[in-house]
Image (cartoon, rainbow, N blue to C red):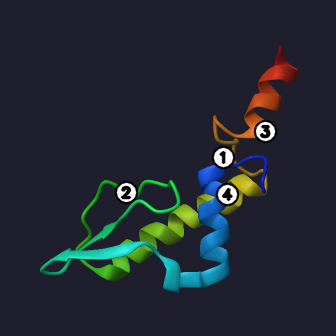
Amino acid sequence: MYKTLNQAENDFLRHITMWGSAAYPTQKVGNGKWIWREFWGVKGAPTVYKTKKACVEAIERYMDILRDKAAGRLPPSQDSPAYAEAIRAAA
């Protein structure tokens, strides 16, 4: 578990890393409309995409953000263990 991610983000990252793009939470909701649905406690983007490709690209951008957080290149999530430790250390 990455200390800079919260539990839902950790679960989402681990699941997608294990199963790859076959596990992306995309769903077709109408005539050529795609959504990113809630999955492993991570809410999808509040957007309806015109193509599945656009929806998948949004998920991949989010995965890049999670990987950067896990590597420490971005600030930790506010409900992550690392954030709580940083607050205690600053006090």
**SS at badge 1:** loop
The image's mark for residue 6 is 1
Sequence-wise first label, 4 or 2: 4
Residue highlighted by disc 3: 82
CA–CA distance in space, label 2 to label 3: 25 Å
Circle 3 or circle 4, nearest the eye? 4
Q: Residue at x 66, y 46 (%)?
A: 6
Residues at badges 2 and 1 in contact (C-beta under 8 Å)?
no
Residue highlighted by disc 4: 10
Q: Is residue 5 left or right of residue 36?
A: right
Q: Where is residue 3 in the image (x, y as percent from the top left)?
A: 79, 47
Circle 2 or circle 1, nearest the eye? 1
Image quadrant assignment for residue 82? top right
**SS at badge 3:** helix
CA–CA distance in space, label 1 to label 3: 9 Å
Circle 1 or circle 3, nearest the eye? 1
| Vertical relation: 52 (above or below) 48 | below
| Vertical relation: 79 (above or below) 63 | above
**SS at badge 2:** loop
Sequence-wise first label, 2 or 1: 1
Residue highlighted by disc 2: 45
- Mark 4 Cα within 10 Å, few/some/many (few <14, many 20+)? many
